[in-house]
């Protein structure tokens, strides 16, 4: 569903056009709206008919605290991956030295 919000300065009214695959709704009056606000990124707008009136429900985005905790968990996972990579390099160094020694011995024969 696509949502367009248009502020018509000449008419001093807000028009909301909601389009889905089969229907198009024009809302030209907000007389029953308790709170006027602009939708922000991450919010979802659901709508449906209740008692023959079209109702809108705004779903809030997740709390910033939840998002911060998720970011911390991801950072911790990434740090663990980096540590593992360093350990792999430390193990690989002695193996490389031994391979060079073996190659040197083979060439001297």
Image (cartoon, rainbow, N blue to C red):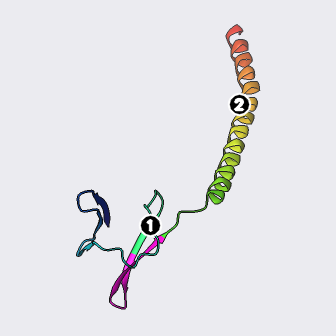
Residue 21 badge? none
Task: Name the side, left or right, on which 14 lies relative to 81.
Answer: left
Identify the residue shown where x is 64% and y is 55%.
Answer: 70
Identify the residue shown where x is 72% and y is 44%.
Answer: 80
Identify the residue shown where x is 43% and y is 61%.
Answer: 39
- The residue wearing badge 2 is 89
- Residue 83, x across and y down, in percent: 73, 38
What is the span of residues highlighted in magenta in the rendered image?
47-58
The Cα–Cα distance between marks 1 and 2, rounded to whole angstroms, is 47 Å
Q: Quadrant of the N terminus?
A: bottom left
Farthest residue, direction bottom: 51
Task: Name the side, left or right, on which 44 lies relative to 93.
Answer: left
Q: Secondary structure at mark 2?
A: helix
92, 49: nearer the viewer: 49
Identify the residue shown where x is 47% and y is 63%.
Answer: 43
Check if mark 1's residue and mark 2's residue have beta carbons within 8 Å.
no
First in sequence: mark 1 or mark 2?
A: 1
Is residue 8 shown above or below 1? Answer: above
Q: Secondary structure at mark 1?
A: strand
- The residue wearing badge 1 is 44
- Residue 79, x across and y down, in percent: 70, 42
- Residue 54, x across and y down, in percent: 34, 81
């Amino acid at each position: 569903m696509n949502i367009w919000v248009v502020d018509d300065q000449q008419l001093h009214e807000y028009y909301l056009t909601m389009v889905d695959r089969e229907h198009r709704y024009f809302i030209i009056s907000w007389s029953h709206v308790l709170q006027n606000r602009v939708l922000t990124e991450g919010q979802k707008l659901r709508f449906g008919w209740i008692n023959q009136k079209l109702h809108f429900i705004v779903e809030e985005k997740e709390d910033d605290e939840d998002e911060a905790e998720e970011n911390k968990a991801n950072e911790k996972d990434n740090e663990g991956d980096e540590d593992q990579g360093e350990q792999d390099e430390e193990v690989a160094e002695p193996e490389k030295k031994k391979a060079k020694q073996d190659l040197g011995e083979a060439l001297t024969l």
